[in-house]
Amino acid sequence: MIERYARPDMTAIWSPESKYGIWLEIETLAAEAMESLGQIPEGTSKAVREKASFEVERIDEIEAEVKHDVIAFLTNVAEHVGEPARFLHKGMTSSDVLDTCLNVQLVRASDLLLKGMDRVLDALQKRAEEHKYTPKIGRSHGIHAEPTTFGVTLATFHAEFARGRARLVAAREEVATCAISGAVGTFANIDPRIEEYVAEKLGLQPEPVSTQVIPRDRHAMFFATLGVIASSVERLATEIRHLQRTEVLEAEEFFSKGQKGSSAMPHKRNPVLTENLTGLARLIRSAVTPALENVALWHERDISHSSVERGIGPDATIHLDFALHRLAGVVENLLIYPDRMMLNMERMGGLHNSQRVLLALVEAGVSREESYTLVQRNAMKTWAGEGAFLDHLKADGDVTAKLSNDELEALFDLDYHFKQVDRIFTRVFG
């Protein structure tokens, strides 16, 4: 994790203090359940609640000797609790604490990520409605195609992020499980009711069957979901980067007073935020393959997944959290240039109407193949810079034999392309 690309609320979830605090809560809740079932002396959990504490530095010191993080933690807690601490961790195994803690952290991270998604969605909807009927040229293969509106363009991204949000909700639910099942997951030395109690208190569901670890297909789906959302971030960032190109300049990132774009060229206004988002998306997606490879553990348990998750858990969630809020800020403050959008559309001399002319000729009785030939031969003259498309069509006797000048001019009505915008917005925004 790099502090430059981190927000404090998300970073706090992955701090040692937060992790050990969750460990202590798991152990304390388990003790409460054991006490209520008469399995440990009355008053044990009260003593733990009142006296338990830990110091990160002391845990590190103990771990340096014992080479086991959970034992080091329990030893440090016992230094505070005293004699009742002997009942902590009764019948449990390290994975009960580690895996349940990880899932608590992922759930908490999900809640922050959902807030980031909501901010992006709100920004996209606001700007889409603002530019619902702002004409711009649509592009396929990077080439002018047919008109659309900037609002419709933003609506496509809103729909995509809404799907991403739904996937994240599902991934959060899938990873929100708890395992307090003991060695190899058989509950041989711990009552399943303890797991149920801990799960309920932590807002989790008991893992139906654990093999000493919570199955990692759950986590693979979680990180895959983050990867898909990161790709959506990159798609929107890439769109903005293209729109900011000097030759296009239909939109650009906000450039604040005093901001500098280049150490060498004072005129530069670079899309640095969206370029940064493109890079962050690559980092987030880099967690997906290791998460998938974590699924195949040996038998009931190995720890090959552990080192991976210590890295990808914080990094992927912290980077995505930062990216979502940076993206929302970009959209909220995006500079949009409708006049430039119209100017760019007009640069191609009306070629964006070629399909309308093609269909009109077909409806007038010309075969599709012949219609295509007639339209294309006139379009290529305009493509070569030899005049306006409409003028060439009016001068082509084969075309005017089927379509009058008035009929041709009517085919160049820009508003024709926007007659279904309301329907699209209703589908996206309700």
Image (cartoon, helix red, strand yellow):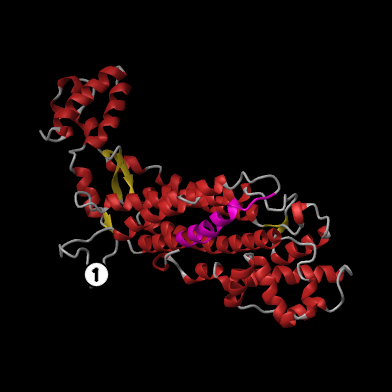
Inspect this view and state whether residue 404 appears: yes
Q: Which residue is mark 1?
A: 259
Q: Which of the two residues, 125 or 395, is positioned nearer the viewer here?
A: 125
Q: Which of the two residues, 187 or 113, is positioned nearer the viewer here?
A: 187
Label 1 crowding class (10 Å Cα cut-off): few <14, some 14-19, many 20+?
few
Inspect this view and state whether residue 430 appears: no
**x, y percentage for residue 175?**
63, 54
Q: Toward which corner of the image does residue 396 lie, by quadrant?
A: top left
Main SS class of the magenta portion in the image: helix
The amino acid type found where label 1 is placed reads Gln
Range covered by the magenta-colored residues: 301-319
Residue at (42%, 47%) from the top-left corner? 156
Image position of 203 with respect to 137: above or below = below
**x, y percentage for residue 213?**
68, 53
Q: Farthest residue in the left direction? A: 386
Q: How many marks?
A: 1
Q: Which secondary structure, mark 1? A: loop
Q: Which of the two residues, 227 or 339, is positioned nearer the viewer here?
A: 227
Q: Is residue 309 one of those drawn in magenta?
A: yes
Residue at (51%, 56%) from the top-left corner? 312
Q: Which of the two residues, 333 or 155, is positioned nearer the viewer here?
A: 333
Image position of 281 with respect to 16: above or below = above
**x, y percentage for residue 169?**
59, 54
Q: Is residue 338 one of those drawn in magenta?
A: no
Q: Is residue 338 left or right of residue 310?
A: left
Q: Farthest residue in the front direction? A: 65
Q: Is residue 54 left or right of residue 181?
A: left
**x, y percentage for residue 235?**
38, 48
Specify the quadrant that holds the N terminus: bottom left
Q: Is residue 103 left or right of residue 314?
A: right
